[in-house]
Amino acid sequence: MAAPIHALRAKRAQHLPTVLSKIEVNQVLGGMQGLHQLMARLLYGCGLRLMESLRLRVKDIDFEQSQVVVREGKGEKDRLTMLPISLMEPLTAQITFVAQQHTRDLTNGFGLVELPFALALKYPNADKAGLRSTHQIAHFVWASGLLILSPFAPQCFALLRS
């Protein structure tokens, strides 16, 4: 019988996260403008990850409670986070812009939004409902000016904007 091996396990390296100072954060945000600055401020102010921000829907922002609902974040878990007061006015303006864009898209025969999971069956008209209606289910906060066909739902033309 062979002698037992007395091996030591390698130690895992301790990586400390890089944290910016308030001055550095202000410099980074100050170097941005427009929609990118608003998105970055939302990432920083709400503690969102990039994909959580990009998947943010109108119904997930609660202005009355100053909260943002993050759906299916890291670990496929939902969570609540705070909405800074300084972002309320710009986010309201962004949602108004998206609502106007959605109305134009519907007028032109586009503007459908892909619904997650089985919501298309539960709310048959929610994909084309107005942003201020009771079916604010699927409308994204961020939109672009270009329409592309969704590879996941060919009937949804304004879901993905590049």
Image (tube, grey):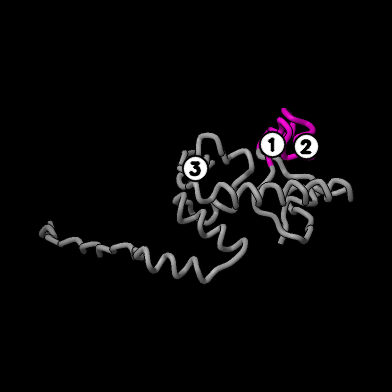
Which residue lies most toward the top here?
122
For badge 3, the amino acid type reads Glu
For the magenta stretch, what is the residue range?
117-138
Asked whether residue 116 is drawn in magenta, I would say no
Asked if residue 13 is positioned above or below residue 67 in the image, the reply reads: below
Asked if residue 22 is positioned above or below residue 103 in the image, the reply reads: below
Secondary element type, mark 3: helix
Asked whether residue 121 is drawn in magenta, I would say yes
Tell me where residue 53 appears, x and y as whole percent: 55, 52
Secondary element type, mark 2: loop
Q: Is residue 50 left or right of residue 118?
A: left
Q: Is residue 84 left or right of residue 153?
A: left
Q: Nearer the viewer, residue 39 or 152?
A: 39
Q: Tell me which numbered mark, 2 or 1, is placed earlier along the sequence.
A: 2
Instruction: Using the numbered discs, state the Cα–Cα distance from disc 3 to disc 1 in whole angstroms.
Output: 22 Å
Instruction: Using the numbered discs, state the Cα–Cα distance from disc 3 to disc 2 in whole angstroms.
Output: 27 Å
For badge 2, the amino acid type reads Ala
Residue plotted at (68% across, 41% down) = 138
Q: Tell me which numbered mark, 3 or 2, is placed earlier along the sequence.
A: 3
Instruction: Using the numbered discs, state the Cα–Cα distance from disc 2 to disc 1 in whole angstroms.
Output: 7 Å
Q: Which corner quadrant holds the C terminus? A: bottom right
Q: Which residue is mark 2?
A: 129
Residue plotted at (12% across, 56% down) = 1
